[in-house]
Amino acid sequence: MDKIRVRGGTRLTGTVEISGSKNAALAIMAGALLVDGKVTLHNVPRIGDIHTMMELLNDLGVSAQFVDRTSVIIDASNVLYLEAPYEVVRRMRASFNVMGPLLARFGFARVPVPGGCDIGARPVNFHIDGLRRLGANLHTEHGVYTAEARKLTGTSIYMDFQSAGATQHLMTAACLANGVTVIENCAAEPEVVDLAEFLNSLGAHIEGAGTTTIKVTGVERLTGGEHTIIPDRQEAGTFAVAGAITRGDIVMRGAVVEHMRPVVNKLEEAGIEVSADSRSMKVRATDRPRAVDIKTNPHPAFPTDLQQPFAALLSVADGTSVITENVYESRFRYVNELNRMGANIRVSARNAVITGVDRLTGCPVAATDLRAGAALICAALAAEGETEMVGVEHIERGYEDLVRKLRGLGAAIERCE
Ligand code: EPU
């Protein structure tokens, strides 16, 4: 079984390169299905989820491959199949977002119903309701959604919750609809803005991305083009925690501070020095962090994807912190593992009450999902002694070269079998 082994206690210093955003790249790669032509994407991270999305595109008969270290060419001129295999959708929920573009361009798509996962039930009702409002006829049978529409038609959509995935999915589908679509109470995440910029550069007409109302004026077709994916704010936030928890001093080259305001705010509240320029962000910590309270919510509030690494940081803070998770109903499963390392965290419904302890101690732990794995690695970097983490495949879904990058900052970390 693959493991990551960490010997804690080294102060991290130096510079780390932030990779391209996983969640922007996944949405953009699905969006490339709208295009009758070639799309070149730069700054694509080489991580498990991106390889899974490529596999899915290949399964549809679309050519998608890395042509150098971070550039991918997708050519969806010849889509051969309009059905996503269960084997892929089961592994990665973001696969569901191929339905809208296939439907918009070819009038038909079949995609399995994605199941729940380790962080919550994660239904797709906003996606389905929105596609129906755009005129699609959708039904499920034998665990597969079949969607049909002669031509999608512009409409108004109001989402009950600012879902990132549903916003990206519906905005993409609406690009080729007849007329105007307005999506209200939509997500304002930087990854939504990146997708909109990508689609607009190919001829789409999207306004308002980055706010909670998006207007899409349908166009006949999109043409090929080129786009550079934004840096991954969750990766940058994870390194910020790794730097802070080891009382280190690190520069994250590529991190975009405008995407990370709520995170910077909490780091500063915890007593960590943060500085930034247009190309990088730096964190420096000399002392134990102070306790802070965090409430997760859609952007521009504190991102749920960083509550787990922050819980590791706050587990060694001076005082008691409360994290309230408002996005997912069960994103606290990693807490038991942190407690086994000596943390004092009590979970009640959507709240985790973290009473800071002086030190954590290393032990064997298991990651249950991507960010849980990141939290355990951060904890291990500060813990006394050795930690061995299984569940490495979760980390590798979303962090490019995490072990190598941490070693570059001085961490005693290795991947072993
Ligand atoms: N939701 C519904 N119905 C829907 C869609 C969502 O009830 O139709 C609920 C979800 O169950 C969840 C909440 O709304 O409780 C928010 O879900 P959202 O749709 O915003 O999440 P997502 O699009 O499925 C993306 C990221 C997640 C990130 C969330 C929130 C990708 C591939 N995934 O998921 O990333 O946590 O947005 O920001 O973009 C991660 O990177 O670790 C990760 C899980």
Image: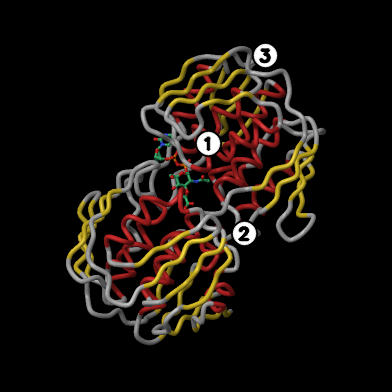
Vertical relation: 73 (above or below) 110: below
Q: Secondary structure at mark 3?
A: loop
Marks 2 and 1: CB-CB under 8 Å? no
Residue at 60 percent of width and 54 percent of height: 20
Q: Quadrant of the C terminus?
A: bottom right
Query: What's the CA distance linking mark 3 and mark 2?
Result: 36 Å
Question: Which amino acid type is shown beneath numbered disc 2?
Answer: Ile
Comparing 276 with 313, the one in front is 276
Query: What's the CA distance linking mark 2 and mark 1?
Result: 24 Å
Vertical relation: 390 (above or below) 58: below
Coordinates of residue 180 in the picture (x, y in percent): 56, 14
Comparing 110 with 39, the one in front is 39
- Which disc is residue 391 wearing? none
Q: Earlier in the sequence, mark 2 or mark 1?
A: 2
Q: Quadrant of the N terminus?
A: bottom right
Q: Tell which tag, 3 or 2, sits nearer the viewer.
A: 2
Residue receiving disc 2: 47
Question: Which amino acid type is shown beneath numbered disc 3?
Answer: Arg
Q: Is the residue indicated by label 2 positioned so its CB lies within 8 Å of ligand 1? A: no
Residue at 44 percent of width and 25 percent of height: 213
Q: Secondary structure at mark 2?
A: loop
- Which disc is residue 113 wearing? 1
Disc 2 packing (10 Å; few <14; some 14–19; many ≥20): some
Q: Earlier in the sequence, mark 1 or mark 3?
A: 1
Residue at 50 percent of width and 43 percent of height: 190
Residue receiving disc 3: 150
Residue 125 as seen in the image, left or right of residue 141 = left
Query: What's the CA distance linking mark 1 and mark 3?
Result: 22 Å
Marks 3 and 2: CB-CB under 8 Å? no
Comparing 251 with 217, the one in front is 251
Residue 195 as seen in the image, left or right of residue 186 = right
